[in-house]
């Protein structure tokens, strides 16, 4: 995501949008350094200044790092309410449901992510759907999902590794 995409979202003053972007960037930096409480505070400030689907989604992602999966899911639901076309929160909800062991429930979220009109990483839900199918023992569906992820992003190392591992384990 770049600043232009962020600044074009929703109604609001340009000044507020720029301040929200700056707070978002600081939050992301803190998150990547493992300073999660600080990141939460900054993401919340960004959302309060100018709410965006990205702000809610990344706040949820931070909560997931903290093991707060239900809070992470709730923030993703807020992101979807803010922008139903943004694919990341659908995929993230599915990923959090996998972590909770709720595989069947995760499938619908990955399918919604695949249909999203605004998604920078469309290979991700295919990989995650493959993970669900693999855990459920649906090998053919898992292989197809991994192949689709690779067709969308030929450099997606996790998908290549998952496909190779699964195929070799079946031989």
Image (tube, helix red, strand yellow):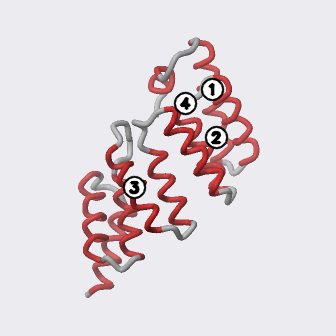
- N-term mark: 4 or 3: 4
**Mark linked to residue 110:** 3
The image quarter containing residue 149 is bottom left
Q: Is residue 91 above or below residue 28?
A: below
Spatial separation of the CA atoms under disc 4 and disc 3: 21 Å
Residue wearing tag 4: 52
Residue wearing tag 2: 29
Asked which secondary structure carries label 4, the reply is loop
Spatial separation of the CA atoms under disc 1 and disc 4: 13 Å
What is the crowding at mark 3: few (fewer than 14 residues within 10 Å), some, or many (at least 20)? many
Q: Residue furthest bottom?
A: 171
- N-term mark: 3 or 1: 1
**Mark linked to residue 22:** 1
Q: Nearer the viewer, residue 125 or 76?
A: 76
Which residue does the image show at 43% across and 67% down from the upper left? 104
Spatial separation of the CA atoms under disc 4 and disc 2: 18 Å
The image quarter containing residue 68 is bottom right
Q: Nearer the viewer, mark 3 or mark 1?
A: 3
* Residue 2 position in % (x across, y down): 47, 29
């Amino acid at each position: 995501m770049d600043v232009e995409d962020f600044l074009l979202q929703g109604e609001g003053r340009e000044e507020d949008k720029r301040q929200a972007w700056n707070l978002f960037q600081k939050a992301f930096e803190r998150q990547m350094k493992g300073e999660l409480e600080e990141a939460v505070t900054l993401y919340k400030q960004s959302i309060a200044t100018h709410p965006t689907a990205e702000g809610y989604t990344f706040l949820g992602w931070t909560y997931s790092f903290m093991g707060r999966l239900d809070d992470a899911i709730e923030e993703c639901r807020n992101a979807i309410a803010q922008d139903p076309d943004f694919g990341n929160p659908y995929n993230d909800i599915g990923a959090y449901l996998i972590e909770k062991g709720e595989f069947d429930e995760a499938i619908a979220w990955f399918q919604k992510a695949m249909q999203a009109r605004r998604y920078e990483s469309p290979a991700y839900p295919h990989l995650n759907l493959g993970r669900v199918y693999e855990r459920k023992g649906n090998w053919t569906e898992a292989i197809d999902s991994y192949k689709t992820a690779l067709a969308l992003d030929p450099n997606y190392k996790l998908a290549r590794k998952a496909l190779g591992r699964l195929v070799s384990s079946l031989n």
